[in-house]
Image (cartoon, rainbow, N blue to C red):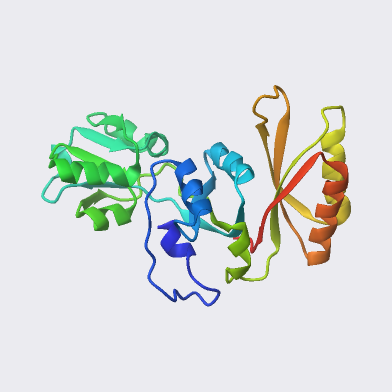
Amino acid sequence: MAALGLLVDVNGQRDRPIEIVPCTLSAVVFERLVAGEVDIAVLPIENSLHGSVAEHYDLLLEHPVRIVSEGLLRIRFNLIAAPGVEFADLRRVLSHPVALAQCRSFLAANPQLEALPFYDTAGSVKHLMEQGLRETAGIAPELAATEYGGTILRRDLEDHAENFTRFHVLCRDESASDWPQQPANKMSVAFSVEHRPGTLVQALQLLANAGVDLTRIESRPVPGRPWEYVFYVEFRFGSIGAAEAALAALQMHCRMVKELGRYAAA
């Protein structure tokens, strides 16, 4: 759903059909992108309720890729069963653990339903349809019912309506300039600082002095170097000059700086 929504040109049109290539692991997504087996990748980076997808920050740093766009997807969960199944027939509900956690009120109000974790939201619907399960439903987005032929028995199960996931569109470094996009006003950067008092504060002050608006900061441990961290920041800027000044200031102060992408804020 995110890919179909994000992969349009600046005029909101799609100039060619999109072939979506599924991958079982996020690391495989990056491997296929870098190898040129796919042109672009769409991955979640943050959910408004459950926070960041930490692994994706690590993979962004490790691979020669660039963020070229971002977008928000409103998360809406539905109870989906095989055609002809009634709500009273159900005994089990399958879904990803995060989805189950976001539908606690519905599950608490229906204790007759045993909630079982599954590898994927849409995958739960695919599974019950393939296996012909008549006492099992899946909690998944509406597109899963359309894709696999299920029937929606209940809509909008999520505890909080203000539930959004932010996605990034990624390209290989060398092809990022070919991506059609709106004028950039946001940048993602990874950096590390010397392990001594005050270095992080000084780095953040440099961003403030450059006149950019820090919107997010995330820290990730450095493998093999206990208690040292890489910091990921996102900031909005009013001009390219401010963005360049911020980046240059970090490069002078920090041990490592990697620009992850410039793009239009969602």
Q: Indicate whether 191 appears above or below 71.
A: above
Q: For this view, does 248 lie left or right of residue 85?
A: right
Q: Is residue 106 visible?
A: yes
Q: Residue at x 61, y 42 (%)?
A: 62
Quadrant housing the N terminus: bottom left
> Where residue 55 appears, x then y in whole percent?
55, 37
For the residue pair 244 and 125, the one nearer the viewer reads as 244
Outermost top residue: 226
> Where residue 82 appears, x then y in whole percent?
16, 47
Q: Indicate whether 9 appears above or below 217.
A: below
Q: For this view, does 183 lie left or right of residue 247?
A: left
Quadrant housing the C terminus: bottom right
Q: Indicate whether 238 appears above or below 75.
A: below
For the residue pair 261 and 100, the one nearer the viewer reads as 261
Q: Residue at x 61, y 51 (%)?
A: 64
> Where residue 221 appears, x then y in whole percent?
66, 30
Q: Quadrant of residue 212?
A: bottom right
> Where residue 83 appears, x then y in whole percent?
13, 51
Q: For this view, does 255 lie left or right of residue 232?
A: right
Q: Residue at x 43, y 50 (%)?
A: 75
**Number of marks drawn:** 0
Q: For this view, does 131 lie left or right of residue 214?
A: left
Outermost front residue: 35
Q: Residue at x 59, y 64 (%)?
A: 175
Q: Is residue 163 visible?
A: no
